[in-house]
Image (cartoon, rainbow, N blue to C red):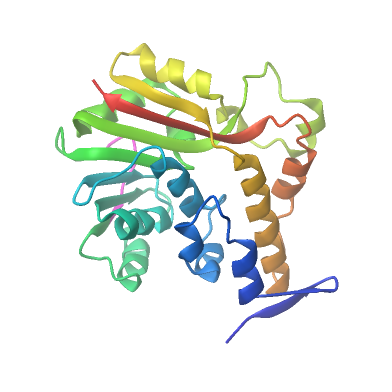
Amino acid sequence: MIAVGVLGTMTIDAGELARRLSVSRYPRSSRYDAVWLVENMMGPCSVWLAEALTNVMPLLPGERVMDLGCGKAMSSIFLAREFGVKVEAIDLWIGAEENAARISNAGLSDVVTAVHSDATCLDFPEGHFDAIISIDAYHYFGTEPKLLGSIVPLLKPGGRLGIVVPGLRTEVEAWPDHLAPWWQEGFETFHSPAWWRQLWEHEGLVHVERADIVPRGADDWLTWTATCDDWARAQGRSPYELEAEMLRADRDGLLGFTRLVATRV
């Protein structure tokens, strides 16, 4: 059954949803079912962000990859399907059984394993992974240097660590007044690429190859959240709205997605 709803004089059904979420910068992601993407969302589109990361951090078939803070394992499914890697899909907030069912429905149970675990106490042998990635999650637990010291040993020598997180183009001394109405606890973890580079390179555990802002990431963030709001209205649910309002109010272009790629030394 195709869900149809009304936003003002506009109808939005699954076809319109797919059209709005088909973004040329994310050709791989645009092949995924738009309803599946929206109904499993936990913030910004994790599949888009995973594509933005792997555009600059390619993965090779058969590699072992940790998806740290995977949420509902959408990024894990994307990585396994698109690159033929084996993924440990690790999350604390979403139970392993729930994620395992989603992974099974995607036909990937043989290559993606759901793990319920805290990022600060991971139980894997040293040098187990070729790559560790974290999509829209690392800022929640990784702003202290000690976490880097606990996860880098899990990488093989020369293994790569990559993250994409909500961030700032430049550091600010205080949250801007014009964005003050949308301040939430947790926004203090939003930092610039330069801030993250300094944090990661301080201990000498990794060499940071890239620290930048995802191109047009703020535009895509707004497209995603506004479309999700419209879809919620179409389904008779309350839209979140505040995130889209904040992004529209960001007149200085402060907000975006910070992207880092580093190699274990």
Identified at 35% across, 40% down, the residue is 133
Rendered position, 174 above or below 106: above
Q: Nearer the viewer, residue 58 or 233?
A: 58
The chief SS type of the magenta part is loop
* Residue 117 point in image, percent of width and height: 31, 46
* Residue 245 point in image, percent of width and height: 77, 46
| Identity of the residue furthest to the bottom in this view | 1
Q: Horizontal placement of 157 versus 179: left or right? A: left
Identified at 79% across, 37% down, the residue is 181
Q: Which quadrant does the N terminus fall into?
A: bottom right
Q: Is residue 45 magenta?
A: no
Identified at 74% across, 54% down, the residue is 241
Q: Nearer the viewer, residue 176 or 81?
A: 81
User: Quarter-wise, where is residue 121 in the image?
Assistant: top left
Counting the numbered discs, the total is 0
**Numbered range of the magenta stretch:** 114-121
* Residue 131 point in image, percent of width and height: 27, 39
Residue 122 visible, this angle: no
Q: Which quadrant does the C terminus fall into?
A: top left
Residue 233 visible, this angle: yes
User: Quarter-wise, where is residue 114 in the image?
Assistant: bottom left
Identified at 47% across, 54% down, the residue is 47
User: Quarter-wise, where is residue 94 in the image?
Assistant: bottom left
* Residue 261 point in image, percent of width and height: 38, 30
